[in-house]
Amino acid sequence: MEQSKDMVNITVLVSGGGSNLQSIMDHIENGYLDKARIAQVISSNPDAYALERAEKSGIPGISITKAQWPEEKERQRIILEKVQAVDTDLIVLAGYMSILGQELIETYRNRMINIHPSLIPKYCGKGFYGKHVHRAVLEGGEPESGATVHFVDEGIDTGKIILQEKVAVEPEDTADTLAARVLTVEHRILPHAIKLFCDGKLGTK
Ligand code: GRF
């Protein structure tokens, strides 16, 4: 793996399947993200398939869980330590289901991004994660949904929006079919946002 000052070192935080992680890895592999390298993957869940994906690609993966570190401050300290240990320029939350500490948020302000499966400010914030989002969109009778990449700040899904893309909601949609359609958009706009960061078009490196 190439390592130079010009490369943007990314730590990807995950909790689940890791299809967004896969999409980032694929876009590095195919040259679209030619200035990015994933330095490590950190999971809040030791059984996350995302960790297997990382391993298959030769990327170091670790889990930092509530079970291992029940004391919140201690867990947050470990996360910050691990992130800084690999000289992280950009943190990408790709399906990360845990809350992050103030120090990490401050240290990585404008250098930490999240992907959310709705058109923020709709269907975001506390309780709106995973299938809950898509169920609520269907129950709300929305004609469209989509995905949003945004900076991470102290709130839940409240940071400045970077990119957003819509999808249609079809009459026969279930939470699963809508989630799948939104995921295809996620897999496009998350790498796009990373590219903007690498090109110095987002925040500061
Ligand atoms: C995605 O829908 C993401 O927006 C949400 O959690 C899901 C994670 O999917 N935060 P994956 O783990 O990247 O496959």
Image (tube, rainbow, N blue to C red):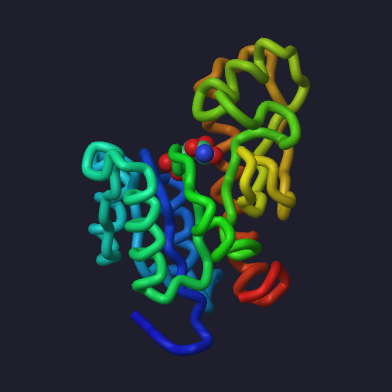
- Quarter-of-image position of residue 79: bottom left
**Which of the two residues, 176 or 131, is positioned nearer the viewer here?**
131
- Residue 184 on image: x %, y %: 56, 42
Q: How many labels does the image show?
A: 0
Q: Position of residue 148 (x, y in %)?
A: 67, 44
User: Residue 166 is drawn in which quadrant?
Assistant: top right
Q: In which quarter of the image is residue 96?
A: top left
Q: Where is residue 191 in the image (x, y as percent from the top left)?
A: 57, 59
Q: Quadrant of the C terminus?
A: bottom right
User: Can residue 87 be seen in the rendering of this structure?
Assistant: yes
Q: Quadrant of the N terminus?
A: bottom left
Residue toward you, 134 or 62: 62
Q: Can residue 48 be seen in this view?
A: no
Most extreme residue toward the bottom is: 5
Which of the pair 131/82 is nearer the observer? 82
Left or right of 126 in this view: 176? left
Whether 168 is drawn above or below 200: the answer is above
Q: Which residue occupies 30% across, 57% down?
A: 54
The picture places residue 118, in percent across and down from the top left corner, at 66, 33
Vertically, is 180 above or below 140?
below
Left or right of 130, for residue 14: left
> Measured along the vertical axis of the image, is residue 136 above or below residue 111?
above
Q: Which residue is at a point 37% across and 41% down the rendered structure image?
A: 15
Residue in the image at 67% along x and 20% along y: 137
Q: Is residue 147 left or right of residue 45?
A: right
Residue drawn at point x = 37 percent, y = 39 percent: 16
Residue 204 located left or right of residue 40? right
